[in-house]
Amino acid sequence: MAYEMILTALADPTRRAIFEDLRGGGRTVAALAEGRSVSRPAVSQHLKVLDLAGLVEVRQEGRSRIYSLRRGGLAPLRTWIDRMWDDALTAYAEEVARQTEDMANAKPGDQVD
Amino acid sequence: MAYEMILTALADPTRRAIFEDLRGGGRTVAALAEGRSVSRPAVSQHLKVLDLAGLVEVRQEGRSRIYSLRRGGLAPLRTWIDRMWDDALTAYAEEVARQTEDMANAKPGDQVD
DNA sequence: ACTTTCCGTAAGTTGTGACTTACGGGTAAG
DNA sequence: CTTACCCGTAAGTCACAACTTACGGAAAGT
């Protein structure tokens, strides 16, 4: 239920750039918007999506809100990838098994490449 | 250059469902389309995107094309996640260091929570 | 040769989401 | 209290991508 939102959130280039900018540490919305080609409200909307996906967290500090990476935010995505990886290996092994089985059932002397 | 395409490819629910279906082993386009709520050409277009992202591979077999998961296709995404993970830890450690430094510079007896 | 099957692509439609500007609510400063 | 700053949200615009149907090519069957 969570990795879908993460994938959707990280698919957009602007949003991904914002996310990657936060590697440098917590930043304000204005700081994230400056130097970028989009308006500040756009950045605010992107941050909302990243927040709902559990990728960032907010900390109020005076009149400015500091956004920073949320620890373990990418964990659900990583788990999904690992499971896909394992299943892919299993599927591949089964396919090999099927092929060798076919070869065993084949009459000796049949053409093989 | 590669993980961006992977994220874009996996963001779409239909395309992700097709990708996950391939965990069971190689399938034809018609087999992937049946039971789904989209037409066969739509599935074909999705498979093209997945192919460009390096996530699947095709094997011609008679008049049907068998699509299957490409081994290591998710590797670039996993690498990117790991790097983000490490950078997040570094950023967090630096932030903690900054805070403890501030506390050391503060006058003894200052309010702390 | 004709038909059927399996598929990719072209062309056109439509919903969605990434933007914009406008506005209003808080908080610090004067 | 007024001003200035930082920010979220509402409303509206617009491009794009996810679909559809229609078509054509390529391989196998009759």
Image (cartoon, coloured by chain):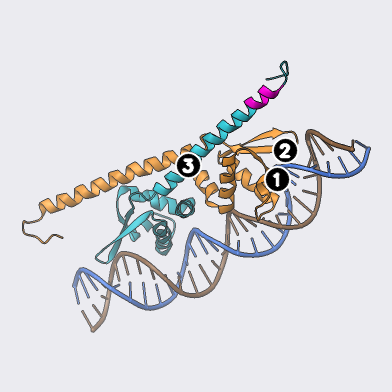
Chain colours: A cyan, B orange, C blue, D brown
Q: Position of residue C8 (x, y in %)?
A: 70, 42
Looking at the rendered structure, the kind of residue marked 3 is Arg
Q: CA distance from mark 1 to mark 3?
A: 26 Å
Looking at the rendered structure, the kind of residue marked 2 is Ser
**In the rendered image, which residue does mark 3 sit on?**
A83
The tally of labels here is: 3
User: Is B63 located above or below residue A21 in the figure?
Assistant: above
Q: Residues within 10 Å of mark 2 (few under 14, many from 20)?
A: few
**Residue B30 marker:** 1
Q: Is residue D11 left or right of residue B94?
A: right
Q: Position of residue B82 (x, y in %)?
A: 38, 40
Figure quadrant of residue D28: top right
User: Is B79 located above or below residue B96 in the figure?
Assistant: above
**Residue A104 included in the magenta stretch of the image:** yes
Q: Secondary structure at mark 3?
A: helix
Q: Residue at x 72, y 38 (%)?
A: B64
Q: Which residues are magenta?
A: A100-106
**Residue B89 marker:** none
Q: Position of residue B27 (x, y in %)?
A: 65, 40
Q: Nearer the viewer, residue A35 or D16?
A: D16
Q: Chain of mark 2?
A: B
Position of the C terminus of chain A by quadrant = top right
Q: Chain of mark 1?
A: B
**In the rendered image, which residue does mark 2 sit on?**
B64
> Mark 2 against mark 3, which lies toward the viewer?
3
Q: Chain of mark 3?
A: A
